[in-house]
Structures are given as structure tokens and as C-alpha cells.
Image: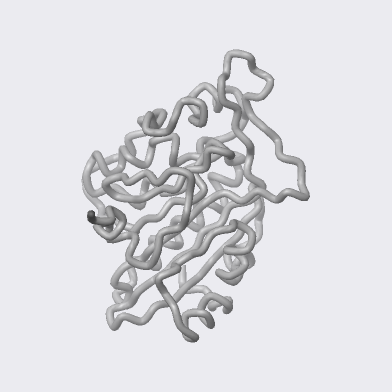
Amino acid sequence: MYNRSNLKRETRYGLPTADQILYNRFYVLGYSYYFRQAKWTLEIVDPDKTDVSRLDNFRPDYRVPEEFRADLEVYEGSGYDRGHLVSSANQREIKIQNSETFLLSNMAPQKPKFNRGIWKQLEEAVRILDSSERVFETYVISGPLFFFDKEVVMIGDDDEKIDVSLPIPHAFFKSILAENNTGTIHMWSFIIPNEATDLPIKDFRVKTSEVEKKSGLFLWDTLVGTKMMREKNRIRKMWKY
């Protein structure tokens, strides 16, 4: 029997674990039943400019069992954005590609000034990195973080009409693996609190190994050896963005 994950280009450098793996046409997602949202998303950045505009067709992902699935009404009036993990602007070559990013399984509750501020800036910076002539492909894993020494606030918990409430992440991570034209791999990782900030993106760089510890995920796990371990345990200088 074929391992389906082996057929997906974006899984070349590893596939973290999750309660349910959702294979979309243009990205892969690991879903958490406990948190009612993705644990992680994995994509190859593909922002080729076409005449495809942002579709904004937010909708539930009916592949997720109903008792673990967040629907549109949980966000209504909550004061939180439906924050993309795989950015809409990263996937825009054809309509179905952009449309897939609006599945609610690709969303997490984000404070508006975070979503439209530092998180958007980081997404744009990743696209600039990917546009470099030296970069062959850019792989990105993104996801929410919950810190159990802090209170977990829920949205939809006080509304009897909503079947599934949703915990609000304390922070989000993004881990970026860029492979250049000679096969050399560079890695950057970020942890950013789910709140407004005026600090620059570079201030949120962390070791990839720190993301692993805080998320409970093995990232880029097919990369083995001393050199890759050093890469995971360094904080690389920011690229120009």
C-alpha cells in the first residue's frame, strides 16, 4: 500500500503528528480534536501572481467530525479574526488553490491587530524570501501555541446555540525551511504572542528546537545528522524584507 504522504511534495522534509491529517490539493493540515483547530499546517509557498483574487469564501471543513469542528457562528461577534495559518496570498495561482485556504480548519482565533499586523508582516516577509533568485522552494509550518501556565479563554463558550466552543491560542509559531538552488537548507523559526505589537519581526526569532518543545511537534523530522541538529539549534540572521 502506498503512503499517501509520500505523494505530497510539501511533506518532503517531514510530517508532524495530529489527530487527523487533512490532505488538501495545495497544502497539508494536522488537526487537533482537543483544541478544535489545526495543530499545524504545512505548505510550499506558491504566490505566483495571476488574475485570481482573494475569494473570502470562509466555510466549515466537513471532513472534521462534527463534535470537534468549529463553524462560522463561533467567530461571529467574538471580536477575534478567523486568522489564516496558510496565507491566502501564498496560494493564488488558480481559484481552487486560493479557495482551500478559506476552510475553517485553516483558521485559528487571532486578535485583529495581531492578524492584520505582525502576522501579516511575517507572511509578506516569507513571500519576499521565496522570491529570492537563490531560493528554489520555501516550506512553511505554522500553528497555534497554548501555554498551560496561563488561562485558556474560550470563544462561543457562553452561547447555548453554539455546539463547539474554541480556545484562543496564546501565541503562534511559524517555521520556515528554504532550500536554495544548490540544495543548501536554511531554517528560521518564530514564536509571536497573539496580541498587537510594534516590535520588528526579527525580535521574535527563536530556535526551531524551542518551537518543538513548546508545540510538542517534531519539525522537519526527515532531516537528520549533526549539521541539521545545529541548524535547528541556531537563530539565523534575518533575510532582507
As drawn, 146 above or below 232? above
Along the horizontal axis of the image, is 213 left or right of 89? right
x, y (%) of residue 101? 37, 42
Please state, as top left, top right, bottom left or bottom right, where the N terminus lies in the image.
bottom left
As drawn, 197 above or below 200? above
x, y (%) of residue 221? 45, 68
Q: Residue furthest top?
A: 161
> Toward the viewer: 175 or 88?
175
Colouring rule applied to residues: one colour
> Toward the viewer: 47 or 34?
34
Q: Residue furthest bottom?
A: 226
**Residue at the spot x=52%, y=80% of the render?**
229
x, y (%) of residue 185? 39, 78
**Residue at the spot x=59%, y=68% of the render?**
205
Along the horizontal axis of the image, is 118 left or right of 179? right
Residue 191, quarter of picture: bottom right
x, y (%) of residue 98? 30, 42
Q: Is residue 58 visible?
A: no
Q: Residue furthest front?
A: 1
> Toward the viewer: 128 or 150?
150
> Toward the viewer: 54 or 178?
178
Count of all numbered marks drawn on residues in the image: 0
Residue 48, quarter of picture: bottom left
Q: Is residue 54 visible?
A: yes
As drawn, 203 above or below 143? below
**Residue at the spot x=48%, y=30% of the render?**
69
